[in-house]
Image (spheres, coloured by chain):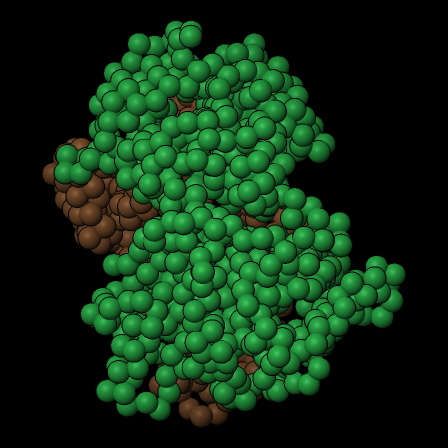
Amino acid sequence: MSTPTLSVSDLRVGSPFNELLHGISFDIAAGERVGLIGESGSGKSLTATSVMGLLPETLAASGTIRLNGVEADLLTAGERRLNSLRGNTMAMVFQEPMTALNPLMRVGAQVAEIMTVHRTEKGRRQARDRAVELLAQVKLPNPAEAALAFPHQLSGGQRQRVMLAMAMANDPQLLLCDEPTTALDVTVQAEVLKLIGNLVTDRGTALLLITHDIAVVAEVCQRVLVMYEGDIVEDGPVGRVLTAPQHPYTQKLIAASDLSSVDDRGRLHTMSMPVISTPRAAASSPRPVAADAAAAPILPPHRAAHQRLEQGGPPVVFNEVAGVPAISVRDVSRQYRRRGGGLFAPAPIVHGLREVSFDVGEGQRFGIVGESGSGKSTLMRILCALDQPSAGTVDVLGQSIAGASERQLRDFRSQVQIVFQDPMGSLDPRMRVRDIVAEPLRNVSRADALARVEAQLNAVGLDADVMHRHPHQFSGGQRQRISIARALITRPRVLVADEAVSALDVSVRAQVLNLLADLVDEYQLTLVFVSHDLGVIRHLCDTVAVISDGRIVECGPTASVYDRPLHPYTRQLVSATPSMRDLARRAAN
Amino acid sequence: MVFVVLRRLGVFATTVVVASVVTFLMLSILPGNAARIALGVQASEADVAAQATAMGLDRPAIVRYLDWFGHVLIGDFGTSTVSRQAIGPEITDALGITVILVLTSVVLALLFAIPFGILTAVRQRKPDGAILSGISQIGVAVPGFLAGMLLVTVFAVTLRWLPAGGWVDPGEDFGGFLEHLILPAIALGSVQGAVLSRYVRSSVLEVMREDFIRTARAKGLGAGPALFRHGLRNAAVPVMTVLGLQIATLLVGAVVIERVFSIPGLGSLLLDKVALRDLPAVQGIVLVLVVFVLALNFLVDLAFTLVDPRLRSAA
């Protein structure tokens, strides 16, 4: 075997008090595509920044990093030498395309800069022309125009394409990608991953792709490294690692990532549980739904509803429920007036939602899935009376909430509770946990409130002694448990969850999803779960509505929608999020 | 882009009108009768009434306001009740001096604050950075008039390099003009410079942590070039906000500094006229000061749109 493009041996990174990487070693051959997976804090980003020589000043690295034929040891190379390698022999793409580009500089100029810095093009004009070519290669529409755009004028996926154009400009031998698609919608993610795969294969670039998402690795890479607490615990071909993981951590990680594999109680595998993989049959429903079916709604054949929608007939009421539904939404539209427009011209109107109608039956688990900008957050806000529809009616638990005053909503507020996405941002950092959880309670004595807080914290799996601490002292999963405790303390009948597990690591995600499923059973809640993640919704919900461009394009029983999608958009969405079994099969071939 | 400028201009004009109404009302509701103030306490009721008619004070407030503001728009600020001369030319002369003083001190403040702020940010973890940062803290704490008196003591009284006060018109003697300008401009600008350098420092520190700086480093730019090519323009945005807010403080400072250095600017004129209770003049000067602040803020807003493309379409 020839010299590897990247050779890392015994890499240790840490501050004087705390070692974060414990002597990791790996090689990447020329043109090889390697994935590096692990959860947050496992050290995967540190590995990449060490290779690039961009570690924070407070951290020191030891060991050796060799880049094929270019430098004996990157860790001891001088700053000037490193500058000539970065962006030239090795290039990096970062996670947040939003913040990774300079907001005040045209993107064409930012791409051209990497060539003028390394003098790989003769002059400014040549570099600019080449930048436009590169933007065309990453399949940006109208590359000449796009080159003149500022980053805020591009979408997230387009910005990530610009980052890729930049990284590939000087034909690097090694490309490092740190969570390149994490902030993107699933369909955009699929396109960008394909692009990355094509670019590195065409040019024979070695790739190190860092991600927390096993599906991303399976999509692009040949080999995978699994990181756990600063060590590489497994290293092997993707197909083998997915189907026959060796290390216990990898086994658990893969089991927890697999939302279609559940235990006897219909709960996901978590990291702390012994793993016995029992993939359920494709046809069987994710959980016993007999109780729900008996409780009420006879679902109308959603296929008929879909047909009517396509023919442009009268507005369709999705998931119509006989009797009194928990939530009833009719012809709800929401328009926004965008700021701007001319001095006299009216500001343009943006349609957040267009004539949406559906029911959610008592005790149903209703999933709303869509990509960013689809209107799912607007719909969630309207259901919680945090926003008012421009037209249409919303009845929740028999009460009309469109246009209701805050006083009229007092009862509603205790009946309908919300769990938000960001468990850090949605908890007041200056309040103690007991006050956060007790806050929704009204007319309850202090002693009573404390007793209820304690009971509620126990119910979400937290000890009572966390009551006196502040939110920053908890991990993401624990904070989400606190949010859930706060939501449930008023004994609501409806629980609305907005991307409630999107910010969590897979292992924690499985735990929180199990907790939610338990609590929904125990408290007999009606659940509305809003997410971009089809897998999560498939696991948790019995009914799903797919929303795109402000409209519900498809709605029906989860298994039916996923296995036999009717709308082209749903089909696109489903194919962009393959299940673990699909991935394993694909990787094996 | 044109629309954004026009809109800002519209906001500016509206604010000027509102400011004129407020100025007019404030001086109208002050206790005392302008006619009696003009004639003095000895005057008879009949004389006061005649004076009031002559000054137009018997007309309704709205008519008086429109008459006053209408004339102000064509540069006529009315007649002084004390000197019985037109107020306009006096204000224009004083305004010219104050504008020169304030703008010079802004330029000096920026010339000091930008390099100093960047230096303290870049050297943040080094001992010299900490020392420099401490010096700017002291600068923030020293009031402008004290700095002025210290400068006079050192450079005018002890060293006799520069005059202690007074003013020379640049058209008359440019060298003399500069000699008279330098100490008051430094006194006025030093505090602003110290305050601004704090903001430059925190703004640069913030920017150095941004993802796009890391991107620039990953492209192969060194730490310095990355900061200069990508960081400084981004760091300028919050600093400009502070600069806009500081301008009002700067004018208040100018009123004091003009006294300390006996410069015949707007501040001196205002204090003189207040002492004489020359209400029409006070009203005119206050309005000019307000418009001056608004105009500078308008320019800062325009500069914002030039620096930040996101504001060109959105705002």
Counting the numbered discs, the total is 0
Q: Position of residue A205 (x, y in %)?
A: 51, 18
Looking at the image, residue A260 lies above or below residue A386: above
Residue B62, quarter of picture? bottom right
Residue A576, position as x, y percentages in the image: 63, 43
Q: Is residue A485 visible?
A: yes
Q: Residue A414, relative to residue A436: is it above or below?
A: below
Chain colored brown: B
Colour seen for chain A: green
In screen coordinates, is A460 left or right of A514? left
Report the front residue among A565 and B287: A565
Residue B311 at what x, y percent from top left? 57, 48
In the displayed structure image, the side of residue A46 where residue A370 appears, left or right: right
Q: Residue at 23% of width from left, 50% of height from top? A: B140
| Residue in the picture at 59% in, 73% down | A290
The answer to whether residue B243 is visible is: no
Foreground pick, B118 / A75: A75
State which quarter of the image contains the C terminus of chain B: bottom right
Image point (63%, 28%), residue name: A138
* Image quadrant containing the N terminus of chain B: top right
Q: Nearer the viewer, residue A404 or A73?
A: A73
Q: Position of residue A186 (x, y in %)?
A: 59, 45
Residue at (71, 33) in percent of width and height = A141
Depth check: give the residue in front, B137 or A114. A114
Q: Name the residue at the left extreme.
A: B158
Question: Is A554 positioned to the left or the right of A449 in the image?
Answer: right
